[in-house]
Image (tube, grey):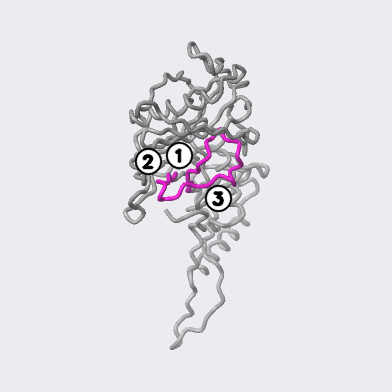
Amino acid sequence: MQVLCVFFGVLVVRAWAQVLPAGAPVLPTVTLPPCDSPEAEMAAGVFQDYINAQRTSGFKYSLNQIDEIKITAMPNMDIYKMEIELLETKCHVLDPTPLAACPVRTKAEVAVEADCDVAFTKTGGVLTVVQHRCKSELETSAEDLCVGCPNLLPLNDTNALQMTTASLAAFNNRTANVSLSKYAILEVGRLSTQILAGGPSVFSEYAIVETNCTTTEDDNCVALNQTVASYGFCTAGSVNANVAVDCRIFAPQEPILPPAQNGRVPGVPAQNSTVSVPAQNGTVPVVPVVPVVPVVPAFMPVLDGPGLLSAESAESLESLKMRPASIIPIVKREAPAAETVAPSGQPPMVPVVPICPGKVKHFLT
């Protein structure tokens, strides 16, 4: 009955529109397509690429689920409003690894979820992100906690930062070849602790940038310009005062600018360098690190950093306001179904098939 009412309503609107005088304004039409429809998937993919290309710090995000979509067709454009759920991956935004090859953090690894309200315009077949608002939060629950699982530390934890600087010193001291540049910490992305068989351990994930010093120089090191500097990403750990580090160095990248739609962070495959160096006298040495201020584009998305609890965002955005129309036909999200014969002469039941939210691509949150 509900489907028939909507269908009848659309017929009434169309019949009414046929008697409108010439030159009368065309009414917008609102449709609610399935969340797994091609237009929904395409728009979500555009936003996924957009948000990762805009970010200059933290980790890449991967689409997990499309929660809602509404498309308003207007004479000169279509307006999309969507609710999209993303999950943090293990790839830093400067890592040129394709997003499809970046693993998503599991709940046991303290996953980070970002819920985003997004508005697009579509003109000439091209989707453009015009506004978005995201909130991020740690995705854990009592059922996901386990003995021996990692626990996140604040990004200003003193002991973890000391281990981080010691691990970078070990990487910089990997050779006495003066032709190799020294690296400085660009940003610390995640600090964690875990109880292992050898005792308490501390882990760090951080990005590094090339400086104008060689590995034999210690003073007055300055980060190279981003057009020529090499960047890298390191994972380090310390168990019983033994520090081990693994760093991947990326080739010099292009300047970080607000990208075109569907833009991606450029780069080439990285080379691996691994160093494992025990600390001396049972303590972790503290090595001065050259502070580096990353270049920030004029526009940055509202997306909290990884490893931090974020406040709940405000209400979902309503980014584009349209003129109120007297009648706006709405096509409901209800799949057509064949009529069934109900018992005792009752009216046939028409099942409503829920088609939003869409399918989960990684795991339920």
Q: Identify the residue under disc 2.
A: 313
Look at 42% across and 26% down and name the residue there. 166
* Nearest to the observer: residue 117 or residue 189: 189
| Image x and y of residue 331, in percent | 54, 59
111 inside magenta stretch: yes
> In terms of sequence position, does the residue under pointer 1 or pointer 3 come before the other?
3
Cα–Cα span, label 1 and label 3: 18 Å
- In the rendered structure, which amino acid carries the disc numbered 3? Ile
Q: Identify the residue under disc 3.
A: 71
Look at 37% across and 48% down and name the residue there. 149
Cα–Cα span, label 2 and label 1: 8 Å
30 inside magenta stretch: no
Cα–Cα span, label 2 and label 3: 23 Å
- In the rendered structure, which amino acid carries the disc numbered 1? Arg
- Residue 145 in the figure: left or right of residue 127: left
Determine whether 313 is above or below 354 in the image.
above
The answer to whether marks 2 and 1 mark residues whose Cβ atoms lie closer than 8 Å is yes
> In terms of sequence position, does the residue under pointer 2 or pointer 1 come before the other?
1
